[in-house]
Amino acid sequence: MNEEKIHIKFEEAVKYVNDFKEPLPADLLLKLYAYYKIANKNYNNPGSKTPLINAFKANALIQAKNIGRKEAMKHYIELVDMEIRNIK
């Protein structure tokens, strides 16, 4: 899959998650968070007002730190396809 197709599929997956109404498991949300941040080259510290949430988010980013932008998009798409689209 070329870069443009990956980017389009990534944006579609992000929209799908944003529009999803059912609650999602915290571990899945943390993985999606990390992949999203890496895919968008957003390496800012987590912005939650709750220190514990910031710690979990920072940990998720540390676990995914060795992947590139394109790979993060692919992982995000795969998670959405395998874990969220199958919920309905």
Image: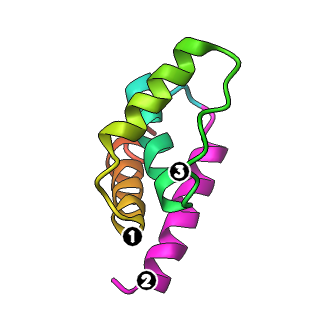
Instruction: State which region is magenta.
Output: 1-21
Pointer 2 with pointer 1, Cβ within 8 A:
yes
Earlier along the polypeptide chain: callout 2 or callout 1? 2
Q: What label does residue 37 carry, if any?
A: 3
Depth check: 44 or 50 in front?
Answer: 44
Q: Amino acid at mark 1?
A: Lys
**Residue 81: quadrant of the picture:** bottom left
Earlier along the polypeptide chain: callout 3 or callout 2? 2
Front position among marks 3 and 2: 3
Tell me if 51 is positioned left or right of 47 in this view. Answer: left
Q: Amino acid at mark 2?
A: Glu
Indicate whether 56 appears above or below 88.
Answer: above
- Residue at horizontal 39 percent and vertical 70 percent from the top: 70
What residue sits right under mark 1 in the picture? 70
Identity of the residue furthest to the front in this view: 44
Tell me if mark 1 has few (under 14), some (14-19) or many (20+) residues whose alpha carbon lies within 10 angstroms of its own: some
Q: Examine the structure image and report whether residue 22 is included in the region drawn in magenta.
A: no
Horizontal and vertical percent position of residue 54: 55, 23
Depth check: 47 or 5 in front?
Answer: 47
Depth check: 26 or 23 in front?
Answer: 26
- Residue at horizontal 34 percent and vertical 56 percent from the top: 75
Task: Classify the position of the N terminus by image quarter.
Answer: bottom left
Q: CA distance from mark 3 to mark 2?
A: 17 Å
Horizontal and vertical percent position of residue 2: 38, 86
What residue sits right under mark 2 in the picture? 3
